[in-house]
Image (cartoon, rainbow, N blue to C red):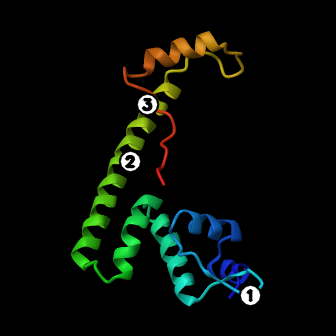
Amino acid sequence: MNIGALAQLTGVSADTLRYYEREKLLAPPCRAANGYRVYNEADAARVRFVRSAQALGFSLAEIRWILPRLNAGQVQRAEIETHLNKKLAEIDGHIKQLRTLRKEVQATLSSLRCEQQTQVTVQQATSEAMQRAPARRVAGPRRRTA
């Protein structure tokens, strides 16, 4: 099948498939006489695995590491369980952080002292927020490594 057919079959874009190829998540496909990429059902299964692993929160680096081992039949259930339990622990940590953040946002909301229709300046908002916020480092968005 060509790249368009594989994209449609797996529910990803052709650009995503090319990206997976560049990132070594998908082996370079054979080429037809016209230079078009030619894929097979094994490639579709691999793309489905990558997508499902991503949906479970695994990074592309983690997926890239395990794919060759899966293909070679070198992964046992115990190892899969270890990876899944590690992911569960990460998720539990994120949930704990989000619960703490939710409490902080709720407390800040409850501590607002001005009337609902009052215009608030940055200085006022900052001083009120700083009085409520615990002394901790504010982290930016978490970056995923490929």
List x then y, in percent, for residue 21. 58, 69
Does residue 119 appear left or right of residue 42 in this picture?
right
Q: Residue furthest left?
A: 78
Q: Residue furthest front?
A: 33
Against 46, residue 51 (above or below) is above
Q: Residue under circle 2?
A: 94
List x then y, in percent, for residue 146. 48, 55
Q: Residues within 10 Å of mark 2 (few under 14, many from 20)?
A: few
SS class of the residue under badge 1?
Answer: loop
Circle 3/circle 1 CB separation < 8 Å: no
List x then y, in percent, for residue 104. 43, 31
Could you tell me how far apart the alpha carbons at marks 3 and 2 are, in whole angstroms?
15 Å
SS class of the residue under badge 2?
Answer: helix
- Residue at (48, 76) in percent of width and height: 49
Q: Residues within 10 Å of mark 1 (few under 14, many from 20)?
A: few
Task: For marks 3 and 1, give the one nearer the viewer.
Answer: 1
Q: Residue under circle 3?
A: 104
Residue type marked 3: Glu
Q: Which mark sits nearer the N-terminus, 3 or 1?
A: 1
Q: Which mark sits nearer the N-terminus, 3 or 2?
A: 2
- Residue at (34, 45) in percent of width and height: 96
Report the label total.
3
Could you tell me how far apart the alpha carbons at marks 3 and 1 are, in whole angstroms?
62 Å
Q: Residue under circle 1?
A: 33
Could you tell me how far apart the alpha carbons at marks 1 and 2 are, in whole angstroms?
50 Å
Against 132, residue 42 (above or below) is below
List x then y, in percent, for residue 120. 67, 15
Residue nearest the viewer, comparing 141 with 95: 141
